[in-house]
Image (spheres, rainbow, N blue to C red):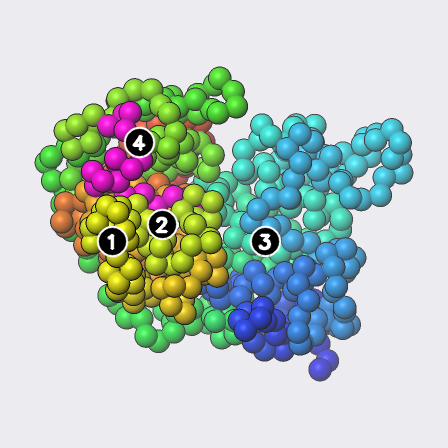
Amino acid sequence: MTPSESTLLEMRGVRKTFGPVIALDNVTLNVKRGEIHGLLGGNGAGKTTLMNVLFGLYKADAGEIAVDGRVAQVRSPREAIGLGIGMVHQQFLQVNSFSAAENIVLGTPLRNRPTLDLTTPKQKIRALSEKFGLSLDPDATLESQPMGVRQRVEILKALYRDAKLLILDEPTTMLTPQQVDSLFNSLRAMVKSGLSVIFITHKLREVLTLCERITVLRNGKSVITLAREEATEDTFIKAMVGEEMNIGRSLLFAKSSYETEIAQVGSKELLKVDGLSVEAASQENQVISDWSFTLREGEILGVAGVAGNGQHELAESLMGIRPCKGKVVFDGAEMTTLVTRDLLARGIAYVPENRWDDGLLPKATVAQNLILGSHRRPPYSNGLMLNLGAILKRSQELIDEFKIKTESPQSLAANLSGGNVQRMMLARAFSQNPKLMIVHNPTQGLDIPSTEFVYNKLLERKRAGMGTLLISENLDELFLMCNRVAAIYRGRIVGVLERGQFDAYRVGRMMSGLE
């Protein structure tokens, strides 16, 4: 196959398996010089796996990679970098105690290694920063920098190594709208200078805004590749989720169809938080300072903020996991000093952010995980012994209802994929029929039909009077589902907006501490 002169990268017939699981099946990808190419698909579609093959982190079982028209063996990230390929991962690979410049040059040869004089590297870093609008201070220590700056360090790390193809894996997840705009402007400047970008995302709006061409993966296969102007939103949506989804009725794409239902809220005050403060475990400063808010029956209150601004501590303090100061009243009774077991018994459910460390017993079965928190109460227990029959029966019902992919209720939970662990935790929380649900990034890792299923479940419980504290880094999700949104910055509530006041840029300013 003879590539066009405009073609920078070709991946042909790529296959990758992990045991019996086929992650990639005969995938083809073509990237031109000087273009931003979107790689779109739901969770588990194979986007990151394909790019990990390209970057040398995984070895493909079949297929070939051609760069600049030449077939290349990419057996390690070092070989990928040598071919001009750079990758910015979802989880940044950084040393917090190092400066920005030290992180950028880490692993590269230095002429004056004994003295670590970075004068010349810093000059190159500043030139790249100015050229592509990636402003940062090369001497700033990373641990004090926000996510936007940390991401620029990762991008500059690739550019410093003379990358001609830059891979960005879900780069907007932890950015404010203003930071997203700035990133997009930088990427456009890069392609104007001749670089190519592969932009991995599951967000349709982003690829339609930024990318010239878009490839959709589904179930490990490449479905279509189209120029942005050649297809409608529905074309890409159907490619992502298949033909089985009724686009016209989807909550995700027909917000006006349930606007009235979202607006309906009860008059009874369900949760009242007054002067809540939480101190960091390792130091004396407060990670949450003087938070006060109320939540009514049938209300969905959103919490918007860049990761690391107190969301995790808020959820854990309300669930009795982390000590706090102030006063918390739930359903008319003070609960500030109650432990988690008592809070669960009183009707509060919790879906934590860290599904692996905080929400899962990996060595227990799926069934045991599904009843966790209710395992001491009927019908699962008589106080002395567990009722295995009742546990397995209810677990199978939840597995079917929430479409958890597992061989049986008695399979180990450690064998579940990330998306199925999330479904399991959501099933557990909803099955408890709570009065209040605290959910942190509930649809993270879920595909579009599964996300829609979760939203429908929240609305179903909302109609029954359940209050929801929805902590999410996805503004689209918050604007779609919430009656009010509280914006936070550095452990403080900056402001609370009613549904009619929602504006992405205003919330972004609040999340940045500017308003």
- The residue labelled by disc 2 is 442
Quarter the C terminus occupies: top left
Q: Earlier in the sequence, mark 4 or mark 3?
A: 3
Asked if residue 337 is among those painted magenta in the image, a careful observer would answer yes
Q: Which residues are magenta?
A: 335-354
Q: Earlier in the sequence, mark 1 or mark 4?
A: 4
Tell me residue 393's x, y (percent).
26, 64
Front-most of residues 78 and 36: 78
- Which labelled disc corresponds to residue 339? 4
Q: Amino acid at mark 3?
A: Leu
Provide the secondary structure element on which disc 4 rests. Answer: loop
- The residue labelled by disc 3 is 168
- Which labelled disc corresponds to residue 380? 1
Residue in view at x 68 percent, y 67 percent: 59
Q: Amino acid at mark 1?
A: Tyr
Front-most of residues 435 and 32: 435
Comparing marks 3 and 2, which lies closer to the viewer? 2
Asked if residue 151 is among those painted magenta in the image, a careful observer would answer no
**Spatial CA span between label 2 and label 1:** 26 Å
Residue in view at x 54 percent, y 37 percent: 147
Quarter holding residue 124: top right
